[in-house]
Every structure is written in structure tokens, then in C-alpha cells.
Amino acid sequence: MSDATQQDAPQSNGPVLAADGTPLKQSLARSLRRQKLRALILIAPLLLFVILSFLVPIASMLFRSVENGIVEETLPETVAELASWDATSGELPPEEVYAAFVRDMVVAVDEKTHTRLGSRLNYEETGMSSMFRRSGRAIKKLDPVEDAPFKEKLIDIHDGWGEVKTWATIQTHSGKYTDGYFLNAVDMQRTAEGPEMQPENKRILLTLFGRTLKMSLIITGFCILLSYPVAWLLANLPMRISNLLMILVLLPFWTSLLVRTSAWKVMLQQQGVINDTLVWLGLVADDARLVIINNQIGTIVAMTHILLPFMILPMYSVMQTIQPTYLRAAKSLGATNWTAFWRVYFPQSIPGIGAGSILVFILAIGYYITPEIVGGTKGVFISNRIAYHISSSLNWGLAAALGTILLAVVLILYWAYDKIVGIDNVKLG
Amino acid sequence: MKYSKYLMSVAAVALAGAATAEEMTIVSWGGAYSKSQLKAYHEPYSEKTGITIINDDSSNEAVAKLRAMNEADNVTWDVVDVVASDAIRLCDEGLAMEIDADEVLAPAPDGTPASEDFGDLLVSECFIPQIVYSTTFGYRTDMVGDTPPTDVCAVFDTEAYPGKRALEKRPINNMEWALICDGVGFDEVYDVLATDEGQDRALAKLETIKDDVVWWSAGADTPQLLADGEVVMGSTYNGRLFSVIEEQKQPVAMLWDAQVFDLDGWIIPAGLSEERKQRALDYIYFATDTQRLADQAKYISYGPARASSAPLVGQHAELGIEMAPHMPTDPENAKRTFLYNYEFWADYRDDIDAKFQAWLAQ
């Protein structure tokens, strides 16, 4: 083939032909395509599995952060009538809105969707939940035609229907899609006048995002410092001893996360092992025991310990491939121990540090159970808040928005890492 | 463990759907509480009917999981044990079945209809009450000197009772106690707490002990902290304190003052097939009659929800001690009690929780 191209190339600008007469480019592309297709078929089961069980659920969860169909679906006529009402005028909406609302509610109460809407709107305006629940019972008894007009009747049922802000909340959040959850996720809220910051005493999520990133970095840093010597020993000690050491690294790795975290509780609490020992040694007075749990120190200590294997193992597998002869060569050329390590050994071990750091950092910012148990109030992460909104407050929209932001932050950091260090410089072995 | 059980129950129910195996999945809280239900309800029921009961300890996430199951249109639970506030939310979301108490529950032995026997405790159309429990304080008897606390405000008195206190890491109950100890009357607590000033006032009161508080999130935390001497006093569920005091014999005593009553009971998920619904109703009828509710109190110190069960409460099944004096509803313990306001917290939970968490993080 190479002969043919070499002969043809200088002669003409026409296409290079393959043995069967078709242009070489085309036949090459065809065979490549066939190869790719074959590869694709081979990985298809895995690909399908990943898409169906991993990507689709994540995407549908993320979609919840903007999805807001419930208001329009539950109160279609009200939303249409409210469109022409000006919330900033300070006046209550006209009778048509009230009449439409009663018609919508009669249907909603029948389908029991009004309380669900109440819970949704309660995220935006406290008190909506009980307003919808209580009003539902009374509105059920109204006839949408005969009992008109409704304005005063509704205000009789609940004062809230006589307040502008109730209707403004419904109007503001009536869109099919909303940015409200994302605004909430960064301590803001959408009002009739547009987005604005939450009151000072309700801002918590930005603090938590900042804390999560800062503490994950600290934990990654400690992991690097502690793991490097261990990985070096594992890679350089005689096989017999290093195997034993390896077991010591892996044993906690195989132990339940909860057990390890609870063990730290026993170690760190004020009547715990460490404090007792220090008091016994006379280093700490009995009435001034160290507070090293239920705060940031507790989270950092426990999480560093739990994540250590994820740093040690990639480091170890990279260090194993570094030839000891390089160090000997450096020394024979006159390098001191330190120079030989720093100029020859360390640069070769960087891919291991890179892989370990990414692994530990990404695991750390999503950590939930350890901060919950040993973090007290100042050592909890954003994931604890996500868990709260998923399982306690049921504000899945906000939880999805927080999760999306967290995912975006990880992707941005990954991209930045690739730009600065280069992802090719990462090795798992 | 929990998940394997869950998977097993999912698999079992899937199988049950195909064959007509007589099985049902009952969701509860686990630990000593599930054990009391196993002894008092499940075992006699299985014996009577031959139905195998599968336990799933998922009650603390029941609302979220039921919502997920409902969206997936695959409800695998038959009967779920939840606290009253969760039952109200499940009812609001249309995830729990509405129930007519007189129709589906047994009358009292003297013929009193169920709705009267349960009385005010039927707080939601979907909720079948089972027990009355309370959140209250326990203290270390060896750490309070010669004057053991008798008043809930001892929690806020760090001069007389130095040491750490354990409080739950959420606003519910803590805000109420703070206001009570700031001079607000029992009747006015929720009116005050509904205002911004009232919420600030409660947080300001909590601020005075903020540095002395260990915040707990699992019911087992306070018993452990008390047993280790980490805290001098702490709030938790009264049944947990009972087991620290009577079963583990720790130097701990109850401070019943201003205990907050709450209810726990059953719901049946909405959208069950007719066959499973009937089976669930049959179980409920059996498990909530006067005698069964009294039987549960043999194993755990929670008060039965029926008025007619109270006189039948006897001795602890293993320890042999009288259970009545350990019930939160015992007149001696219930001198000053506080009833959790479900509707208030349904409205204010998100708002006050955000403020509370922001305050904690400061």
C-alpha cells in the first residue's frame, strides 16, 4: 500500500485507489466504521446498562431542579386568569380569579392534589400548606356555579386568600419551568419583583458549599501527606513485610464505614480514649478536655482516615513501577539523598498523587454519613443538606438543584485540573 | 443489613405478586421498637393466619421512599409505621389511604366505637394511632449534685448544672422548650413561634447554651452520650431512656417536665391491589385492638393509643417491673406536658429549619 501511494502521490491530484478500485479514503473509512460498529456491539450491553441505570436516573433527578408543572396542572384556569393581574398594584385579583380558583380547587380536592400543591408553595411562602389543606375541606362544599361570588367566601374560609402576597406567590411560581430552586440553592429567592437574596438569618447553603470545598481540600492534603510515606514503604520494603503492611492498609478499607466512624467517636469524645490518655499523662487538665469531635476537627480526622486507602493504593501502584536503579544512578552521579528523591523519584510519582487526589477529593465533597455523625454543627457538608431535603423536607427540587450545582463544580474542577496538571498525567497503575 | 432486608422484601413481594404466597411487608423503626411489635403483633398474627411478615426498618425515610415507589408505580410495602406528622404529609401527598376508623378498626371490648376509643389521637384521615411517646430529658444522677433537676429549664441553667447537654439537631421541640423557659405560657408557644420576633427570641434563648450543646441526629445518640458521661442531660424518646435506666442500669433518671407528646401509628399506602389492601386492613384490625395495644407495652415503655388499653398495661415481659409508672401518660409523669402541634410544623418546618440551621452554622 505504501508503495502505491508513494508512486501515485507525485503524479496526480486524483483520489488514491484501493485494490478493488474504490477510493482508498472511502474504503478505509468503511472498514473503520465496521470495526467501530463491531466494538459498539460488543460493549452494547454495558453501555445500555450504564445509560439506563445510571445516566437516565441522574438526568431525570437533575431535571427536577427546573420542573414546576404542578401549579399549572392543578390550577389551570386560575393561572390563566392571573396572567392579566398586576401583582405590584397592591390590589387583590378580580372576582374572575376567585371563581376560576374555586373551579380548579373543586377538581383538585376531588383528586387530592391540592395538598400536594400546598406543600410545593409552602417552600416559597410559609403557611401555604395548611391554607390549602384547610380550605380544601370548605371549598369541597361550594358549587362553582350557584355559590358565586366567591371572593368574600374564600376570605371567610381563610384570611390568606385576602392577601396580595398569596396570589403573587401563585402567579410568580406558575411557570412550567422555574429557576426558583436554583435561586434557593444559592440563598436567593424569586419574588414578584424578581430574584433577591434571602434574609440574612436564612442563608446557609453558600456557606455549606464553601465549607465543603475547603474541607475536602484540607482532607485531600492530609491524605497526601500521610499516604506518601506509607505508599513508599509498601513499594520498597521486602515483599514479606510489605504484604503485611498492605493487609494493614486494606483491613480498615474492608471494614464498614459506620463502624470506623463510630470508632472515631469512641476515640475522640471528651470522655474518650485520647482525652483520657492525655489527662492520665497530665498533659491536659481534667476540666479542660480537648474538644476534638462534633466540629470540623472531628470531620477532618475521621474522613482523612476513611479516605486514606483511596490515596495509598494509586500511589503505591505508581511507585511500584519506578525503577530503583534510577535512584542509584542519580546517587552515583553525585546527587545527595534529597536531590535524588526530589529530582528523580518524586516527579515520577506525581501521576499517583494526581490520581489519588482526584479520587479522594471527589469522594470527599459528596460525603454524607461521616460528617453527619462526627461533624456536629460546624463540620457538616452540603450533602447533609441534600439528604435533609430528599428524606425530611421532601423538597426534591431544591435537592436536585443542589446536586446539579455540586456536579457542575466537580466537572469544572476536573476541567481545571486537566488544564493545569493534564489528565494524561494521572495513572492508576 | 437494612438494605439486604429491603432487597429481600422487594424480591419477596415481586414473587408474591406472581404466586399467591401469603406474605406482607411491614415497615417500622427497627431496634427495640420493632421487637416489641414482633412480639405483640407479628408473631400472634402469623400464628393465627399463616401469613409471613417481612420486616423492613425504613420508617425514618418512609415518606421519601413511598413517594419514590409511588412515582415508579411499584409500591412494595403493605403497612407502614410512621409518626403522626409524617402520616399527615403522606395523606397530603395522596400517598396514604384514607380510613374510616369505625369501619376498619375494632371497637373497644365494652362496645365503644374505635373513633371514640382513640379520640383526639386520630389526627389525620389516613392515620391509625398505635402508641403515645414523648420526647423528654434524662440526666446523669451522679453529675447533678444534691439537687436533681425537676424543671425543664434546668437545661438552660448552666450555672446550677454545668456540663454538656444533648439536643436534637432540628428546631422542633427545642424552639418550644426555649420559649417556655423564656417565660412564654404553654398555650401561647405556637402563637409566639409563628412570628419572626418569636423565632428570634427562641434562638436567642438557645444561644445562651449553644456552646454547651452536643447536637444529636439519631435517637440512639443521647443514650450513648449519657452512658459515657459525655453529657449531663439530654433529650430523646422516653423509651430509649427507659432502656438506659432499667435495662442497662445506668445512673440516669427521667426529667418528665414539659415532655412533648407525639404519636406513632400505622398507615396503609395508597394504590395497593385489592387483595393486598384487604390483607393490610385485616392485619390493622388485629394489631390495633385493645388487648394487642396493651400487649406492646410489655416490651417497651410507650403508652397505648386506646383509652381502653390503659387499664390492661401490665408488667415488663422480661424485667418483671410494673410498666405503668414508666408510661409518658402516667399521671405522675404527665403533670406538665406539651402537645406537638402538627399543623404548625407542617407550615413552618421549612422556614424555621432554614433559620435554625443558619443559626447553628454561625
Image (cartoon, coloured by chain):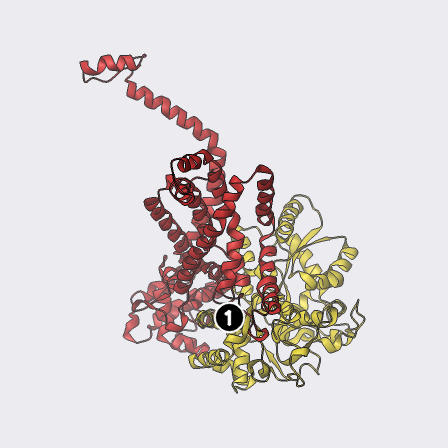
Q: Is residue A26 left or right of residue B45?
A: left
- Write down which chain is painted red: A
**Image quadrant assignment for residue A403:** bottom left
Q: Is residue A62 left or right of residue B220?
A: left
Q: Is residue A135 visible?
A: no
**Image quadrant assignment for residue B118:** bottom right
Question: Can you give x and y, in whole percent of width and height, for residue A4 in the image?
Answer: 27, 12
Q: Is residue A361 left or right of residue A10?
A: right
Q: Residues within 10 Å of mark 1 (few under 14, many from 20)?
A: many
Question: Can you give x and y, in whole percent of width and height, for residue A195 in the image?
Answer: 31, 66
Residue closer to the observer: B287 or A21: A21
Where is mark 1, residue-wise? B346
Q: Is residue A422 visible?
A: yes
Amino acid identity at mark 1:
Ala
Question: Can you give x and y, in whole percent of width and height, for residue A44 in the image?
Answer: 47, 33
Q: Secondary structure at mark 1?
A: helix
Question: Can you give x and y, in whole percent of width and height, for residue B197 in the image?
Answer: 43, 81
Residue closer to the observer: A95 or B157: B157
- Write down which chain is painted yellow: B
Residue closer to the observer: A107 or B273: B273
